[in-house]
């Protein structure tokens, strides 16, 4: 993928979608809006959806809204409640859902299926809107798919090539045969069929017999018997009533399984004769010319939806029983998930990996919802016989509390992050935070051309080893020699043109104790410079250093000047907290001259720190504490005396050249003040003040043309 606009404009994928039903068109619309090129192949001569009404539940309506489709604008009305009757005609349930529906962030609508299909199709192919219009090709029956090369061939012999093929060709999917063994996985009669028809609400209201069965606007009504049920609910702004008579499939004469199979009204009335007269009067309103019947098909859960560069979605992957129209809703979720895992900038080489992620993201949920719809289609005695307890409210909670765009985009984010060894720290909720050590591959690539550099101010002196030992966190730290005269430094760095800080920089100043060793429990020894305290002038590196490295960092103001010590021969560093000065370090008589030989403790192989994480709610206890070693010395030099860094970055002639100025005089002054004046750092400055300075060995200001990111630090044991 193209990251942060680096590497040129992101490339669009060429997507071939087989099938122009709700799932295929939604996938086309979503992928188009992201910026991909989409071709949709439809078998029929007219990409028109017929049929009756459909639920657009909260888990689905929000996804459509993201794409600019608002169901209320195409005649959708709110789903406001449920009423339930027994075959005797007794009402056993009347639930007003308007208040409970407020818990969902998106509305629950009932809409005419054809109106929804038309709205999605028009948005997908329109010259207006985001992205390039989808190319919808009718009378294009696909007969074969080259899954490895993303090619499809139509019945006419025409070949369409792309980067990815999406099979949205329904329950009788051709594409499925290129993913799984269709002899083993083929649609079968679920045991139920359904009649469906539409009747104007006015016609029902004008008839006194049927008017008494009309509930308030937006109500779904059911008459539920042991093996059949009559379901009806309004659509088209509550002006048209959608009816569904689900019954044992053996009672329908027709062998047809197509959605638009013409139904026999007399047969339907015979099947529904067990219902009370007023419910039979409802069924008698069915218009004979538009009455449809179809067998409800099912399919065993298939092991995968993907083969190579072909992915299935909708009924091609998971046909549903007609509960809350979750077949359409889950097809829309599939479509949105595919758009989420295939964002603009996805390379063709990543397709297979992303399609596997799509299956991982979607399959468990779709399989679970599919099983819910199977159970909902069972009669109560059948559920009891199988030991199943079905709670519609539990199903709604699971189903409606999900947003596939949010879920799939998060899944992609985690998937991409898992491919690299990112360092995590708080806040975890938003993924790994940028820092000097990450993303390693990305930052280091930029650093090869970066201008990062630093000025390193050091005053090295002899001091009391017996006092400095009191600053060691455990007895495993000790000096490499038994001498009581030891060496330490106050070193301050001004880091400039830092890539990870957008070209800005910051200052830090710390106490470094030389000639220290740490002996691990297994006898392993690490020798180097121990860092008991480091002040920094910027929050960002303080947080990264404390959490990632265990560095003993704290914040304060650090002012360094003048900028050019060459001209004045003098520079100083003032340190303070909210305007209250507590430190003053001065270098005088700075000039380039030969280095004086200063004996230094050996070996000095790196930097030692001690990580400590306090246990929450348990004063005095730690969740973690251990020694940390970085195989380089204090900023600016490595163990062999060479300038350190992730690499010798930046060769621009404008970058400062390496040089060192040596001072003839230097001094260090600390004012610890009191707890009221310096409430958070008084104890630290008081400790600094107690460090005796026997003799200043050297005082330098070095220009170092790179910056080391301390990425080599590791836990010792």
Image (cartoon, rainbow, N blue to C red):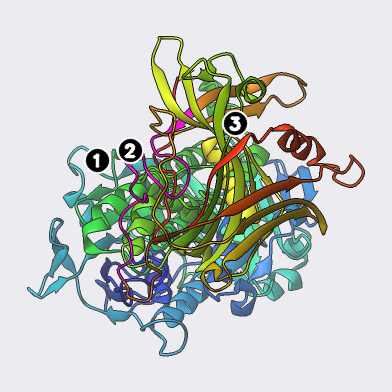
Residue 185 is labelled as 1
Question: For the image shown, how many numbered marks are present on the structure?
Answer: 3
Q: How much space separates mark 3 and mark 2, taking CA atoms?
A: 23 Å
Query: Overall secondary structure of the magenta stretch?
Result: loop
First in sequence, mark 1 or 3: give its number. 1
Which residue lies at the image location 65% right of the left edge and 43% below the top edge? 397
Question: What is the x, y in percent for residue 284?
Answer: 59, 62
Return the residue at label 3. Answer: 380
Direction from residue 611 to residue 183 in the image, left or right: left
Question: What is the x, y in percent for residue 707?
Answer: 43, 55
Sort mark 3 into few (<14), some (14-19) or many (20+) by Cα contacts within 10 Å.
some
In front: label 3 or label 2: 2
Direction from residue 540 to residue 440 in the image, left or right: left
Return the residue at label 2. Answer: 300
Find out whether the residues at labels 2 and 1 contact each other: C-beta distance under 8 Å: yes
Q: How much space separates mark 2 and mark 1, taking CA atoms?
A: 6 Å
Identify the secondary structure beneath mark 3. helix
Does the stretch in magenta take in 59?
A: no
- Residue at the extreme bottom: 127
Give, as a single range, the part of the protein colored magenta: 628-651
Whether residue 621 is situated above or below residue 447 in the rendered picture? above
First in sequence, mark 3 or 2: give its number. 2
First in sequence, mark 2 or 1: give its number. 1
Question: What is the x, y in percent for residue 287?
Answer: 52, 70
Which residue lies at the image location 41% right of the left edge and 78% below the top edge? 124
Which residue lies at the image location 35% right of the left edge and 48% below the top edge? 357
Identify the secondary structure beneath mark 1. loop
């Amino acid at each position: 993928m193209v990251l942060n606009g680096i590497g040129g404009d992101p490339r669009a994928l060429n997507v071939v979608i087989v099938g122009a039903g709700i799932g295929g068109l939604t996938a086309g619309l979503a992928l188009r809006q992201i910026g991909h090129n989409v071709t949709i192949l439809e078998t029929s001569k007219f990409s028109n959806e017929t049929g009756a009404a459909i639920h657009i539940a909260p888990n689905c309506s929000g996804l459509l809204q993201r794409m600019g489709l608002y169901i209320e604008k195409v005649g959708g009305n709110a789903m406001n409640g449920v009423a339930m009757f027994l075959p005797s005609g007794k009402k056993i349930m009347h639930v007003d859902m308007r208040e409970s529906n407020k818990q969902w962030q998106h509305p629950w609508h009932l809409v005419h299926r054809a109106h929804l299909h038309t709205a999605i199709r028009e948005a997908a192919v329109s010259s207006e809107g985001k992205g390039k219009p989808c190319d919808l090709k009718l009378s294009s029956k696909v007969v074969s798919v080259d899954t490895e090369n993303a090619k499809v061939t139509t019945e006419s012999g025409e070949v369409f090539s792309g980067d990815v093929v999406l099979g949205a060709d329904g329950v009788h999917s051709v594409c499925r045969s290129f993913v799984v063994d269709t002899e083993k996985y083929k649609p079968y009669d679920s045991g139920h069929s359904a009649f469906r028809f539409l009747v104007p609400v006015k016609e029902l209201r004008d008839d006194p017999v049927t008017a008494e069965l009309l509930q308030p606007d937006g109500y779904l009504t059911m008459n539920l018997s042991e093996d059949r049920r009559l379901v009806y609910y309004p659509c088209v702004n509550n002006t048209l009533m959608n009816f569904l008579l689900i019954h044992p499939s053996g009672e329908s004469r027709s062998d047809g399984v197509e959605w638009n199979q013409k139904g026999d009204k007399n047969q339907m009335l015979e099947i529904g004769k067990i219902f009370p007269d007023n419910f039979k009067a409802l069924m008698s309103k069915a218009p004979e010319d538009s009455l449809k019947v179809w067998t409800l098909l099912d399919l065993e859960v298939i092991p995968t939806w993907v083969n190579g560069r072909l992915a299935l979605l909708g009924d091609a992957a998971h046909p549903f029983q007609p509960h809350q129209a979750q077949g359409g809703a889950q097809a829309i979720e599939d479509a949105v998930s595919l758009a989420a895992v295939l964002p603009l900038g996805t390379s063709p080489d990543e397709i297979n990996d992303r399609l596997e992620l799509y299956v991982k993201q979607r399959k468990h949920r779709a399989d679970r919802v599919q099983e819910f719809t199977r159970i909902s289609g069972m009669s109560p005695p059948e559920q009891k016989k199988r030991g199943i307890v079905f709670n519609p409210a539990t199903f709604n909670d699971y189903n409606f509390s999900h947003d596939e765009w949010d879920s799939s985009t998060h899944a992609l984010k985690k998937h991409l992050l898992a491919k690299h060894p990112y360092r995590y720290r708080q806040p975890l909720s938003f993924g790994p935070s940028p820092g000097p050590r990450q993303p390693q591959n990305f930052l280091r690539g930029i650093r090869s051309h970066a201008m990062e550099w630093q000025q390193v101010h050091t005053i090295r002196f002899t001091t009391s080893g017996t006092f400095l030992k009191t600053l060691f966190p455990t007895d495993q730290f000790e000096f490499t020699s038994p001498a009581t005269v030891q060496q330490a430094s106050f070193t301050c760095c001004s880091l400039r043109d830092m890539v990870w800080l957008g070209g800005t920089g910051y200052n830090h100043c710390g106490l470094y104790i030389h000639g220290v060793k740490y002996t691990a429990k297994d006898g392993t020894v690490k020798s180097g410079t121990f860092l008991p305290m480091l002040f920094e002038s910027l929050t960002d590196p303080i947080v990264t250093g404390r959490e990632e490295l265990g560095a003993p960092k704290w914040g304060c103001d650090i002012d360094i000047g003048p900028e050019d010590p060459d001209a004045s021969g003098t520079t100083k560093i003032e340190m303070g907290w909210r305007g209250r000065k507590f430190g003053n370090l001065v270098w005088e008589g700075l000039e380039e001259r030969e280095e004086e030989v200063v004996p230094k403790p050996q070996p000095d192989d790196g930097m030692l720190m001690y990580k400590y994480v306090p246990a929450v709610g348990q004063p005095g206890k730690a969740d973690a504490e251990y020694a940390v070693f970085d195989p380089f010395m204090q900023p600016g030099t490595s163990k062999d005396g060479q300038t350190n860094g992730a690499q010798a970055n930046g060769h621009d002639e404008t970058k400062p050249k390496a040089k060192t100025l040596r001072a003839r005089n230097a001094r260090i002054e600390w004012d610890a003040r009191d707890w009221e004046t310096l409430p958070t750092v008084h104890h630290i400055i008081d400790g600094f003040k107690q460090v005796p300075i026997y003799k200043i060995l050297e005082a330098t200001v070095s220009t170092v043309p790179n910056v080391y990111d301390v990425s080599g630090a590791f836990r010792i044991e």
